Amino acid sequence: MFIDWVALLLLNMLIGYFLLAWYVAVGLGEADQKRWAPAFGMVGLIALVFGGTMVVTWPLPGPYGSIYGEMSVLFGITFLGASVSLAKGWDLRPVALYGFFAGLAAMVLAVRIVDLKLTTHPVMTGIGFLLSGLGGVAALPTLAWFRDNKIVRYAGALVLILAGLIWVATAYPALWMHAAAFKDWQPMTMRGVVPPPAH
């Protein structure tokens, strides 16, 4: 049995997409941008720390450590960059440029997940990655040219909500399944097993 925290990454990601949808639809036009910084920072910190841990330790079989870990790192650092920028009153466009290329990576993975039939529901997962990536790609043009266009912003928020809903449909069943899968699991210290000394 391998131990993973994909459910945590998925839950954090869906929260991030709903937060971002709310920000795009409503917050982008507000005078007080700083109030959004803590929430973006919370999402970014969890994604970066636990996605980074997944990249380093690779607890998942096959390519899943890369798919979920690396994309979580990109997602997390983008949200942390947005958090700092919002707190400091800096221009969000440089962060959005980073998000553009991170979004392209998610869209490439969307095609590959469906192509290789990865995950138990490859089409749904692929659509989730595609919509998530589209959100990242669209951030830069939205900030650069359509910041005051409510139709474009609402359309972008809708895409983000749809991405969030895909991750809702993925994260909560994963959380439910993990409770059963790890019900009888015991850490080594509770099994009385002493790991061999390192050489």
Image (spheres, rainbow, N blue to C red):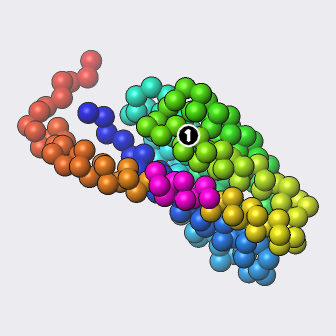
The answer to which of 98 and 63 lies nearer the viewer is 63
Which residue shows up at 38% across the image and 50% down it? 174
As drawn, 4 above or below 150: above
Specify whether 82 is left or right of 187: right
Specify whether 96 is left or right of 185: right
Is 164 inside the magenta-drawn segment? yes
Specify whether 80 is left or right of 8: right
Q: Residue furthest top?
A: 199
Q: Secondary structure at mark 1?
A: helix
Specify whether 79 is left or right of 140: left
The stretch in magenta equals: 162-170
Which residue shows up at 12% across the image and 43% down it? 190
Which residue shows up at 76% across the image and 72% down it? 28
Q: Amino acid at mark 1?
A: Val
Is 87 inside the magenta-drawn segment? no
**The N terminus appears in which quarter of the rendering?**
top left
As drawn, 105 above or below 47: above
Image coords of residue 13 (percent x, y): 54, 55
Q: Would you say the magenta stretch is mainly helix, strand or loop?
A: helix
The answer to which of 118 and 188 lies nearer the viewer is 118
Q: Residue furthest right?
A: 145
* Residue 55 can be seen in this image: no
The residue indicated by pointer 1 is: 123
Residue 152, by quadrant, is bottom right
Image coords of residue 81 (percent x, y): 68, 56
**The C terminus appears in which quarter of the rendering?**
top left
Image coords of residue 35 (percent x, y): 65, 77
* Residue 120 can be seen in this image: yes
Residue 59, by quadrant, is top left
Label 1 Cα crowd, 10 Å radius (few <14 / some 14-19 / many 20+): some
As drawn, 32 above or below 3: below
Image coords of residue 96 (percent x, y): 77, 54
